[in-house]
Image (cartoon, rainbow, N blue to C red):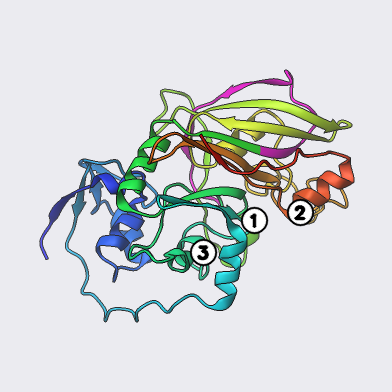
Amino acid sequence: MSVAIRTVSEDEAEIRLDRWFRRHFPALTQGVIEKLCRTGQVRVDGRRADAATRLAPGQAVRVPPLPASPPPPPRATPPDAATERDLERMMLWRDDQLIVLDKPHGLPTQGGPGIARHLDGMLDGLRLGYAERPRLVHRLDRETSGVVIAARTKPAAAFLSAAFAAQEVEKTYLALVCGGAPAPAAGAIEAALARAPGRIDLDLVRTGRRTDRVAPAGREDAGAARAITDYRTLDHAGSKLTWLELSPLTGRTHQLRVHCAALGTPILGDLKYGTERLSRNAAAEGAMVAGLSSQLHLHARRLVLPHPAGGMLEVEAGLPLHMRETFWMLGFSAPAVRAPRRC
């Protein structure tokens, strides 16, 4: 195979570069894709790009000569009964254009090295009579729970991806942060973000695997992307823990986690950005708050988005178990979840 140039289609908006390659060349492994990117053989609009780069319609992807393909993998088997039950529990809304799910804490949105079970891989169980499998149009970190949207058709996927890219989706998160209440109690965090060199993750010391990481950057720094988050203090427990409502106005990788840490109030249980200077034991005690869960306390509570068939859709998801338990211990009272509505 010689070098080829392929154009990103409308229904591929916001897809990661590695997922784009797996869609067009399903025999390629993640390791091969990352090597092609790392060595500069893959380029987007003539520039080097890493595997996590988000693509836009009309961009040109340089496809280098690819290694010989191994035998095709066996066809996917239908989801088992346990997966079907899990998907049924996650479902918040369903119509002929899209499906809204409440992703649990700890479930990756997409696959990758060492990840056998992830939400994207479960979506065959949500065809529900359609020939097409649903497509995720955005994602959450593995440790973040809450509302996730999957489109049921290619036109719906293109419409929703464009809505996210144009910042037409209103996103509301709830977080518990350490270090007391921010000052002022409400405001905006505007700090550009850029990818930083990988480091050894505390959870992966034995494997030595490096993880994606971003950090605040100057606007003129190479690779810096504008990032803005509105925040509001809802309650606090003494000088140690505060309940924040977060509204990202941009959609950068790890934006909320980095912005909270930059504010001086890292999210409870955030080993990557909030407690990296602590020992693992101290972090596991709940970021210096003994007796609380060490899991990340960040939840995608609410989405308000344009619906492909017209109007707006509003969907909320209740807190995950570990956050409910922490709220109960601190005496916080989260408002009841409102039923989904389209207007």
Mark 2: few/some/many CA within 10 Å (<14, 14-19, 20+): some
Q: Position of residue 251 (x, y in %)?
A: 48, 36
Q: Position of residue 8 (x, y in %)?
A: 23, 47
Q: Which mark is residue 105?
A: 1
Q: Is residue 38 visible?
A: no
The residues colored magenta run 174-199
- Asked if the residues shown at circle 1 and circle 2 are in contact, with their CB atoms under 8 angstroms apart, the answer is yes
169 horizontally vs 334: left or right:
left
Amino acid marked by disc 3: His
The residue indicated by pointer 2 is 322
Amino acid marked by disc 1: His
Give the mark nearest the N terminus, 3 or 2. 3
Q: Nearer the viewer, residue 24 or 283?
A: 24
- Asked if the residues shown at circle 3 and circle 1 are in contact, with their CB atoms under 8 angstroms apart, the answer is no
Amino acid marked by disc 2: His
Q: Residue at x 22, y 41 (%)?
A: 59
The CA span between labels 3 and 2 is: 20 Å
The CA span between labels 3 and 1 is: 12 Å
12 part of magenta stretch? no
The residue indicated by pointer 3 is 118
319 horizontally vs 285: left or right:
left
Q: Position of residue 68 (x, y in %)?
A: 20, 74
Q: Residue at x 35, y 57 (%)?
A: 19
Identify whether 21 is placed above or below 159: below
The CA span between labels 1 and 2 is: 9 Å
Identify whether 144 is placed above or below 110: above
Identify the secondary structure beneath mark 2: helix
Identify whether 160 is placed above or below 125: above
| Image quadrant in which the N terminus is located | bottom left
175 part of magenta stretch? yes
In which quadrant of the rendered view does residue 188 lie? top right
Q: Is residue 118 visible?
A: yes
